[in-house]
Image (cartoon, helix red, strand yellow):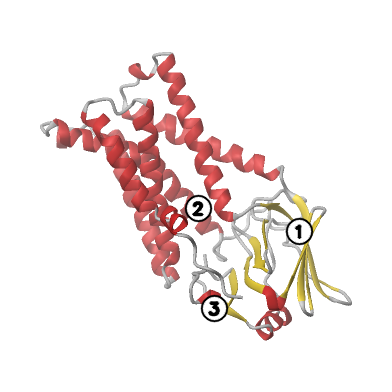
C-alpha cells in the first residue's frame, strides 16, 4: 500500500538547518547589544547550536559509505571540541582588537558550541557503542541478548522495551535539556548570580556538564521506568506484536515498513502498515541482569518470508540495522 507524501509543514519541520539559521538570526540582536545572556537569546542560542549539531550528525549517518561517515563524525567532534576549548580557555588575544560586532559573533558562536559539542559527542559515543569490535567489559561479558524461540506457528522473541517512537525520544531529550537549562538561567538571573559569572570556563562547565549531561542521564533513567514486557512473533502470514497488555497484528501484505536494529541505545523494532504503527525501543529499556538490552539478528526464514510477501530489504549504512519496505514506499521514503 503506497504511503502518501508528508504534508509541507511536516517536511518543513524536518529541516534543522533552516530553523538553526532562524534561531541564530533572532538571537543575534541581543548579542550585538551586549545582552546575550538574557533568557530568550540564551534559549535561542541553545536551539541554534543543537539544531546545527543535529543536522551534522544526521548527515554523517545518511552517508552511504559508513567508514567515511564515521571519520567525518570523528573529525567534526574534534573540530567542535577544539573550537569550544579555544573559545572557553583562550585568552582572547586573537580578537582583543576586533570590533564589537566580531566579538558579539564570537560570543554567540561559542555559546552555541556548548549544546552542539554535547550532541555531537553523545552521537559519537552512541555510534562507537554499536561497533562490533568494541570489547564487552567484565560486568557485561556474561550478558546475552534475547534468543529466538520456535513454536508451532512461527518464531517468537521476548524482550523488554519502551514503547516510543525514536523521533519522540530525541525530541524529549532535547526539550528536557533546554527546559532545565532555561530554569537554571532563570534561577541565576533571579538570584543575580549570573552577573558574577564572568568566566567562559564556569559557563561551559555549568551548562555543558553540570546541567546537560546529568539531565540526559536522568531522562534516560526515567524512560527505563516505562519499560514493558514485549514479544514479537513472526507467523506464516503476519507479525504479532505484544507490548504489555496491548497486541498489534499486521498482515505481511499490509506491512509497509519494518525496522529491526540489534545494537546500541537505538536497538528497536518498528512496524507500520494496515493503519497501525508500533515502535519498541529496547536499547534504553530496563532488562534483567543476565539479558542485554539488544535484539538478535532476524533469522533467515523470517527474511525469506518478508521477501516472499513483496517486501524489499533496503541497503543500510549500519551493519546492525535491517529495513524492509515495499517498493512504492521505498521509492519515496529513506530508511533512518
SS type, badge 3: helix
17 shown above or below 33: below
Query: Can residue 184 be seen in this snapshot?
Result: yes
Q: Which mark is residue 125?
A: 2
Image quadrant of residue 38?
top left
- In this view of the protein, which residue sits in the foreground, 11 or 169? 11
Relative side of 70 to 297, left or right: left
Q: Earlier in the sequence, mark 3 or mark 1?
A: 1
Which residue does the numbered mark 1 point to in the structure image? 159
Left or right of 8 in this view: 92: left
Closer to us: 3 or 60: 3
Q: Residue at x 71, y 76 (%)?
A: 252
Residue under label 3 = 328
275 sits to left or right of 98 = right
| Residue found at the very far right of the displayed protein | 152
The answer, for residue 210, to whether it is visible in the render is no
Q: CA distance from mark 3 to mark 2?
A: 35 Å
Is tag 2's residue or tag 1's residue first in the polypeptide sequence?
2
Query: In the rendered image of this protein, does residue 137 appear above or below residue 297?
Result: above
Amino acid at each position: 500500500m503506497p504511503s502518501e507524501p508528508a504534508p509541507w509543514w511536516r517536511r518543513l519541520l524536518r529541516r534543522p538547518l533552516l530553523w538553526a539559521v532562524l534561531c541564530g538570526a533572532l538571537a543575534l540582536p541581543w548579542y550585538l547589544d551586549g545582552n546575550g545572556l538574557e533568557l530568550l537569546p540564551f534559549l535561542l542560542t541553545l536551539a541554534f547550536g543543537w539544531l546545527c549539531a543535529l543536522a551534522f550528525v544526521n548527515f554523517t549517518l545518511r552517508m552511504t559509505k559508513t567508514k567515511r561517515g564515521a571519520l567525518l563524525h570523528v573529525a567534526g567532534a574534534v573540530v567542535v571540541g577544539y573550537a569550544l576549548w579555544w573559545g572557553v580557555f583562550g585568552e582572547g588575544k586573537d580578537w582583543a582588537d576586533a570590533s564589537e560586532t566580531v566579538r558579539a559573533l564570537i560570543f554567540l558562536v561559542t555559546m552555541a558550541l556548548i549544546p552542539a559539542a554535547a550532541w555531537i559527542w553523545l552521537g559519537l559515543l552512541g555510534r562507537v557503542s554499536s561497533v562490533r569490535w568494541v570489547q564487552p567489559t567484565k560486568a557485561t561479558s556474561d550478558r546475552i541478548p534475547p534468543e529466538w524461540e520456535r513454536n508451532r506457528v512461527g518464531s517468537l522473541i521476548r524482550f523488554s522495551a519502551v514503547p516510543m517512537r525514536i523521533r519522540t525520544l530525541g525530541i524529549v531529550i532535547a526539550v528536557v535539556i533546554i527546559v532545565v537549562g532555561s530554569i537554571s538561567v532563570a534561577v541565576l538571573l533571579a538570584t543575580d548570580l549570573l552577573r558574577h559569572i564572568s568566566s567562559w570556563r564556569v559557563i561551559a562547565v555549568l551548562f555543558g556538564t553540570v546541567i546537560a549531561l546529568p539531565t540526559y542521564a536522568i531522562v534516560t533513567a526515567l524512560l527505563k521506568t516505562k519499560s514493558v514486557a514485549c514479544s514479537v512473533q513472526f507467523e506464516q502470514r503476519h507479525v504479532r506484536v505484544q507490548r504489555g497488555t496491548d497486541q498489534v497484528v499486521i498482515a505481511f501484505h499490509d506491512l509497509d515498513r519494518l525496522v529491526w536494529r540489534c545494537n546500541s541505545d537505538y536497538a528497536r523494532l518498528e512496524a507500520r502498515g494496515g493503519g497501525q504503527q508500533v515502535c519498541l525501543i529496547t536499547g534504553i529499556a530496563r532488562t534483567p541482569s543476565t539479558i542485554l538490552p539488544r535484539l538478535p539478528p532476524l533469522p533467515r526464514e523470517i527474511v525469506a518470508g518478508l521477501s516472499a510477501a513483496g517486501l524489499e530489504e533496503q541497503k543500510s549504512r549500519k551493519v546492525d540495522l535491517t529495513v524492509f519496505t515495499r517498493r512504492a514506499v521505498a521509492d519515496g521514503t529513506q530508511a533512518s
